[in-house]
Image (spheres, coloured by chain):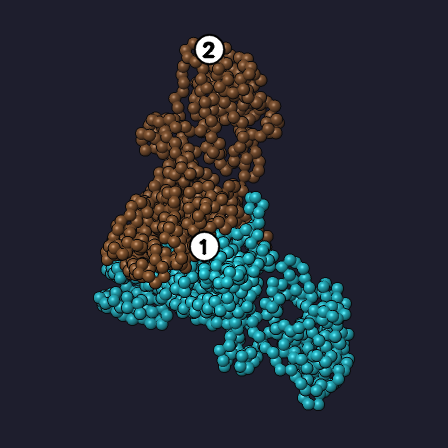
Chain colours: A cyan, B brown
Amino acid sequence: MLRLSHLFVRTLRDDPSDAEVPSHRLLVRAGYIRRAAPGGYTWLPLGWRVLRKVENIVREEMDAIGAQEVHFPALLPRDVYEATGRWTEYGDNLFRLVDRKGADYLLGPTHEEMFTLLVKDLYSSYKDLPVSLYQIQTKYRDEARPRAGLLRGREFLMKDSYSFDIDDAGLAKSYTDHRDAYERIFTRLGLPYVIVKAMSGAMGGSMSEEFLAPIEVGEDTFVRCTSCDYAANTEAVATGALAPDTSEHPATSTLSTPNCPTIASLVEYLNTNAPRSDRTWNASDTLKNVVLTLRNPDGTTSALVVGVPGDREVDIKRIEAQVSPAEVEPMDDATFAKNPGLVRGYIGPQVLGADSATGIRYMLDPSVVPGSAWVTGANQKDTHVLYLVNGRDFTADGTIEAVEVAAGDPCPNCGKALEIARGIEIGHVFQLGRKYADKLGLSVLDQNGKQVVVTMGSYGVGVSRAVASIAEAFHDDIGLKWPRAISPVDVHIVVTGKNGDDITVAGEQLAKHLEAQGLDVILDDRNGVSPGVKFKDAELMGIPTIVVVGKSLADGNVEVRDRHAGTNEAIPVASAVQHVVSLVRS
Amino acid sequence: MLRLSHLFVRTLRDDPSDAEVPSHRLLVRAGYIRRAAPGGYTWLPLGWRVLRKVENIVREEMDAIGAQEVHFPALLPRDVYEATGRWTEYGDNLFRLVDRKGADYLLGPTHEEMFTLLVKDLYSSYKDLPVSLYQIQTKYRDEARPRAGLLRGREFLMKDSYSFDIDDAGLAKSYTDHRDAYERIFTRLGLPYVIVKAMSGAMGGSMSEEFLAPIEVGEDTFVRCTSCDYAANTEAVATGALAPDTSEHPATSTLSTPNCPTIASLVEYLNTNAPRSDRTWNASDTLKNVVLTLRNPDGTTSALVVGVPGDREVDIKRIEAQVSPAEVEPMDDATFAKNPGLVRGYIGPQVLGADSATGIRYMLDPSVVPGSAWVTGANQKDTHVLYLVNGRDFTADGTIEAVEVAAGDPCPNCGKALEIARGIEIGHVFQLGRKYADKLGLSVLDQNGKQVVVTMGSYGVGVSRAVASIAEAFHDDIGLKWPRAISPVDVHIVVTGKNGDDITVAGEQLAKHLEAQGLDVILDDRNGVSPGVKFKDAELMGIPTIVVVGKSLADGNVEVRDRHAGTNEAIPVASAVQHVVSLVRS
């Protein structure tokens, strides 16, 4: 029994000043967590109970698909991450340190290398496969902007698992097993989720999906189709191969366009000074060439220009996902100045591309389809070209998904309108393939005695992040509302009496009887604390069932409050135990 | 059910080349752990089960004394360790790192500061106390010489708890509660232990005891009385205040002592050239002055000379425990050369002491009692002085426990002979007192509304080290022998048949029936592995009960082997389940 007179918890009336999102605010205010360092949190007794319940559900579902639990150190030697290139690729996101002997170490962000080497160490035959291993372990990432409490910390608890198979069919099955297990995990946690297609980030590989909790404060933006079941992280939306525009276009012409600093002013100028016969000019007729700098993990940089329709914005995160591990940023003025071939505001494709005068790499968003005609810069101040046709008058070095996906864009699957939503990444399943096995030499003998490189999957669940996600999904203005499966206890008993009176005695008895039935109980037995404060604390802490033993005891009743439904029911004392047990077990 | 055909484990026939002690050798060979980094180990599925069982026993006993579980980050900001001086005091033993913003961090070796600040954060009144908090968490220490596998690693699992009381009486109770809990923990683990008085090391404070598993490969040397119940870490043995020698001594004389490079040769020379009338000279009549360098955590050094009887060795670790956090080493030749007042081999107290010509600090072992007379160096080559009397002819700056304690030395408690043994530190209980609360400003209002500094205890159990200690205590040449309480499973079934035959079917059934009774089972169902190899693996893995389903099945029997007793019993198949269940539950 957790007696609030002794439980190590203090609720706060005020929001912590650094709390940006409800889960952070409420978990701190209700006494579940406490900030210990930038992006590092201490779990107080109530929070620790929730975390362990989440952890156990994850463990049970991993065990159920035959995955085996192991546990690696977090402090890892540099050499294995060097072998795969991740020592460099992770850039500033990796916590690095040097030991007393001068050797380089890191704090593990994920453990692909270690798992790969462990399997290599123990296994050597196709007969040993498939095998799936997992750990539930503290992970470290030196986030540039730790924020939102547990949602993006620098030290956090993750379940990471890895599957090892002899062939692609095996990997596909391991992947499906994990995906199914994740669906069961989030269902048991009571956490709503959407499965979206994803890019792989720094990890390389192929098939990849994210589990997102569709919550507005989430950092991930995803699209879903309003008609079919397509859903994808915006970074991963493939607009697909569009049909070329086969209409005939006029020959290219050059137009003096003074005082047209913006696309809107250019379009207005065109409609006045070079009107089309068929329709008016639109922003979508213009081709905007955006100059970017790619920064590689080793510090080297290169220039990249992307061409997108003038009515669309460039999405740097999407581009980044495709050029990872390089980081992408707008080109700064100093670098711009070093490229005199680029006339700011009037850049056109004629001077772009690996084989061009500038030699600058040039990529087109797929919406700039072959055969389409564009108004774009003439590489000369106050001058544009009209009817510059992709494939006829210019070429690029390739395509890259570059525009910000917008609500109403066509679904790549069915062509109907997409909608945009935000979510928190709570899980990730990922067909790594042979990348790590290749680099670290993990192969086994197949049935014919031939060495075969093993194919791998990697699968993650953010355990501490799940706690915060659940708090985001289940709360109101006055506090948390835990789903039963992970509530720190089953029932919260508020006793409004004073030491030794009938009410207090009845509350103590009820608590003991509920415990005897196997329920976990918080008993608010604090003396000298007003009923109002006790009710507020109970609502803030968010145990799904609150039992008030108070004045109505005179009528032989207790009040049973449902924190989710907001209902309040008078129940005879005599049947209170049975009633509460049936609520908890339902 | 853990099927060996699928369990992620490989036993090794040969000892790993880096394994110095049986626990390391056998835990690696039996597939419980695997080296991942210097002083860092990966837990494989079997080892992980053992670790978690130990962890759960620790947790249950902590909960039973009302301690509350929390969980801190391991990555901690420098400032709080700076406030207590430990950022510097820990010296090279601390893993330090710098984040992307240039801020200093450390990996927590223990969490006194964080717990103190947490209680300060939440509590403010005497009514809130006492409280005991604990965590079971990964700890980091950059050991100079990680060794012996899990016994001295750089990343390891510890339970650390801290008590907070308003006064000394409260601390004494919290201390006793923890001490009692530790006795229950080690008893449940089946691990033999001795409780010894201890020094506090870098942590400061007063009353302190260690729980040692009395095992020969341990790094700790302790003494225990052959008569009373006194036991102490050798670093903490107090030889106590001895009675001064009140006999009259002759006046000091100087003697030329050529060719006496050793104490033995000096004693021989004395007995020949300056014989005593009452008895012969002994090595214990000589005073040996040993020159040491103290190295402070900030890198500064100072000289220290300790005077000990010539028949005794100096124990640098004992001295170190008294001058901590300074480290102690013999003075090197270069430093020696810079002190011309010190005539190597002939150093006498006349030139030593803070107020002396050299100004070098001089401390005496308590066995050099006031009033005792000594033969010692005359600070001149080939010359000694006789009858130099402590207090009459020289003084020191103080006393320090400096001699290596030897078997037969008198017990400080009862005067009878001490014996010397070795052990592994598995637990530590420690009255920290007000040191941390003072430095970090943890005080509460007492009943009179006055601020009172809180007094603290700190208590540790090495959880991963306990696993290795148990392996040290319970093994033989061929493998491990787990106590039931922490064995990875209850029973190991060896099936000597081939796929699908009667023996295999019977083994499968037995395993299923035992599982239905709630037992955890390893089933060695590997096809194509000889019975001999299976037996060897079972013995190596060390499950206490091994059931062999083999040839004797023809007679209606299975064999039940007791790994501890080494016995082997034929049991009718029909009663095998009942028999094994009763063994496990006994």
Query: Where A289 sits versus B394, above or below?
Result: below
What kind of residue is marked 2? Pro
Q: In which quarter of the image is the N terminus of chain B?
A: bottom left
Q: Residue A71 carries which label?
A: 1
**The disc numbered 2 marks a residue on which chain?**
B
What residue is shown with label 2? B275
Query: Where A350 sits versus B574, above or below?
Result: below
* Picture residue at 49% right of the left edge, 46% below the top: B39
- How would you rate the neighbour count of disc 1 (Cα within 10 Å): few for under 14, some for 14-19, many for 20 or more? some
Q: In this view, does A257 lie to the left or right of B67?
A: right
Query: Where B355 sits versus B540, above or below?
Result: above
Residue B65: percent from the left, percent from the top?
32, 49
Q: In this view, does B402 lie to the left or right of A273?
A: left
Residue B322: percent from the left, percent from the top?
46, 33
* Foreground pick, B73 / A189: A189
Residue A476: percent from the left, percent from the top?
42, 69
What kind of residue is marked 1? His
Residue that lies at the very extreme toward the bottom in this rendered image = A277
* Foreground pick, B84 / A12: B84
Residue A294: percent from the left, percent from the top?
66, 64
* Picture residue at 45% right of the left edge, 71% below the top: A193
- How would you rate the neighbour count of disc 2 (Cα within 10 Å): few for under 14, some for 14-19, many for 20 or more? some
